[in-house]
Amino acid sequence: MKNQRKMIFSKKVDLAEGKPEISVSHYFSFDFSKEFIKKKKVLNIGSWTGGYEMLICNYASKIISVDIEKKALAVIKKNLPQVECYKAYSHDLPFDDNTFDVVTLWAVIEHIPIGYELATLKEIKRVLKPGGYLFLSTMNKNFLSNLLDPAYWLVGHRHYTKYQLKKNAIRCWIYYSKSSKTWFFFNSAQCDIFLHI
């Protein structure tokens, strides 16, 4: 399979001074998911330097972080030694079936190579326990979001419509389980999906 592209960041990861970068979107993600992660085993795919992990470390019983950037994972290990970190691709996770209660994919799906979104969702389905939860966020595809996202124009940063996300989620989840429940939350800039398996 094709490799995922690495994200483009304005500042270099410096391990000596590296701290998890906590943004407004991390606080939103935490607030959106906190009632479902309490005392649960959580996999965060595309963790970068651990902003979300920093917020959930006192809620989840176990946190596992996956990213393709080794230096970013080293920042997590330095600041949050209790978090397990793995360098891996979202479409090829190094975990057994039915391992996690919750999987999060916060603003990551747009960085996966085109055509591998479904493979990633199937892999998430594989590692989620029956009755588990998936939280996913991405940029909402509309004129304003496209216009205001420089990465959309410069490096092909993708945005998704509700229909596109739902189509992939249904193709993956209905194939495996007819009892899936899906909720979508939208604003002008971001699209969020919450799936209960």
Image (cartoon, rainbow, N blue to C red):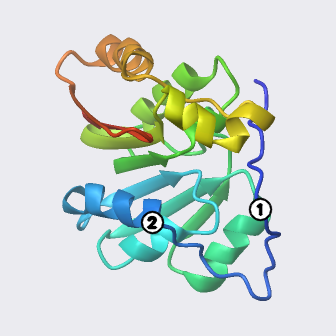
Residue 121 placed where, x, y %?
47, 28
Residue receiving disc 1: 70
Which residue is at 68% across, 66% downward?
73
Kind of residue indicated by mark 2: Val
**Spatial separation of the CA atoms under disc 2 and disc 1:** 24 Å
Residue 78 occupies which quadrant of the picture? bottom right
Counting the numbered discs, the total is: 2
Mark on residue 24?
A: 2
Kind of residue indicated by mark 1: Lys
Which residue is at 35% across, 60% downward?
28
Residue 118 placed where, x, y %?
52, 20
Residue 159 placed where, x, y %?
55, 30
Which residue is at 68% across, 76% downward?
75
Mark on residue 139?
A: none
Judge left or right: residue 30 versus residue 177. Answer: right
Of marks 2 and 1, the one in the foreground: 2
